[in-house]
Image (tube, grey):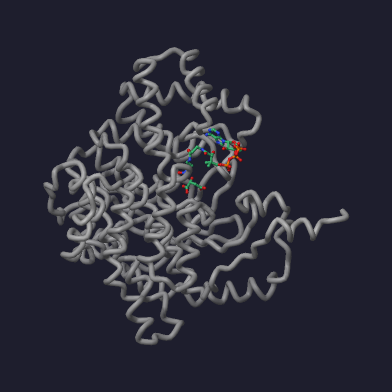
Amino acid sequence: MLSAAASKLGLTGLGVQAISAVGNSIRHFSSTENTDLKQALRELIPAQQERLKALKKAHGAKSLGEVTVDMAIGGMRGIPGMLWETSLLDPEEGIRFRGLSIPELQEKLPAAIPGGQPIPEGLLWLLLTGQVPTASQAAAVTEELRARSNVPLHLRKVLDALPAEAHPMTQLSMGIMALQSGSRFQSAYARGVHKSRYWEYVYEDSMDLIAKLPQLAATIYRRTYRRGEYISPSYNLDWAANLAHMMGYEDPGCQEMMRMYQTIHSDHEGGNVSAHTTHLVGSALSDPYLSFAAGMNGLAGPLHGLANQEVLRWLKDLVAKLGPTPDKDAVRKYVEDTLASGKVVPGYGHAVLRKTDPRYTCQRDFALKYMPEYPLFKLVADLYEVVPEVLGKTGKIKNPWPNVDAHSGVLLQYYGITEENYYTVLFGVSRALGVLSQGVWSRALGLPIERPKSLTMGALEKRFSGQ
Ligand code: NMX
Ligand code: MLT
């Protein structure tokens, strides 16, 4: 039966189901109808601690492979060096969240409207517990986040101290740091809490931060692009729809887009810059605000999350130069010119993926349903016919296919969110779900401070001299 909160949100019912990943297989089994997320975690943690202990005992001394000089110099590409429970990336297939692909998430997670996109609250339950939530469990997360969503008065003062033209990602990072004064982990640590309880305070901070991020993001948007005319939160909307509402967008299609957007950008295993940075900084027992702000500073780089902004700029420039419906030869030349000018083609390529990003495909499917005739969508679809071929011809680009950022701006533009400098903020809000969930587990599992070995060129030369 749906809870009162679930019925109010119109959440669709799902069978009670839970997953546990064992190697590559996923087992589905029944779970009790507990709607308290922290309690669910408390019950799950001891078994996972034992699992890690057993893994270390049985396999701790075994090798995961060779590390070459190229790998050490080349951004540690391909070196398995981190434990990350919430998602796993396959180069050919793309991301799986706790074992589930994006189409499986869309099928199994509770939605706000029948047959609609998953609500990110259900994904958060999944990321934290490994269990597919029921509608009432997802609705309980909506309620929990709502209860934690008030932002302190000083937040707006901190943002207002910045010039109006400060980049939205700078504002996001500063805003998260302004919220850090409320860290419960930091206070608990100062009081001397036992390390076995760290995860509890990291959970509190993570949920507080996730709850407040939509208001912070909407404040940045309205302050920067709508003359500071702010919109109060709605107490009837789910987390992602409320973000769209506070930004000033009420279209039900836009709300669905925001639920989908916030779900698919949440996690991409542990090695990407934003996740790895959050993990690294958190490993020093810096609280979730400090570590997530650091991760967001990484997301703000143009080779990472800022690429969604860069894609729109590149597309606008293309349309300005070639018109809205350019022929293939003109587009080919435009792509070649981008490469010849020493710039990257934004939205294409990936450090790990070797096929079209399933997050691109998911957004394309959304566009086919909601905006099939939108000219910008058609242009992006046409680019797919040209860009990989041109990139492939260079012979050096390992993945010529589009990534998540090649498509996201089109959906935002369609609903009127035209300010591309803002796009990475929406990516960042979503990324909190994955990296902060992992942060809770990192502390629950007692993972140590991260400290890989570095080498000088001289040390490498000496090591291999005479070979
Ligand atoms: N356009 C032009 N050159 C590229 C591209 C591209 N889209 N992708 C890779 N290359 C170049 C790359 O710069 C490198 O050149 P060089 O040897 O002169 O330094 C060469 O191809 C080999 O790079 P790869 O090993 O294929 O890619 P790498 O793992 O180093 O980089 C990215 C991955 C994602 C940084 C790179 O593909 C890129 O810059 N893409 C465009 C920016 C982008 O869309 N980033 C978003 C990624 C997703 N996200 O949200 O984080
Ligand atoms: C991400 O979502 O973090 C990007 O696709 C980059 C990555 O995985 O390296």
For this view, does 64 lie left or right of residue 338?
right
What is the x, y in percent for residue 40?
38, 71
What is the x, y in percent for residue 341?
51, 27
Q: Is residue 161 above or below residue 258?
A: below
What is the x, y in percent for residue 113?
26, 44
Q: Is residue 161 above or below residue 352?
A: below
For this view, does 195 lie left or right of residue 205?
right
User: In the rendered image, which quarter is residue 56 located in?
Assistant: bottom right
For this view, does 291 lie left or right of residue 230?
right
User: Looking at the image, which is closer to me, 228 or 20?
Assistant: 228
Q: Residue at horizontal 33%, vertical 42%? A: 423
For this view, does 381 lie left or right of residue 3?
right
What is the x, y in percent for residue 353?
56, 42
Quarter occupied by the N terminus:
bottom left
Q: Residue at horizontal 18%, vertical 58%? A: 156
User: Looking at the image, which is closer to me, 163 or 346?
Assistant: 163
Total of numbered circles in the picture?
A: 0
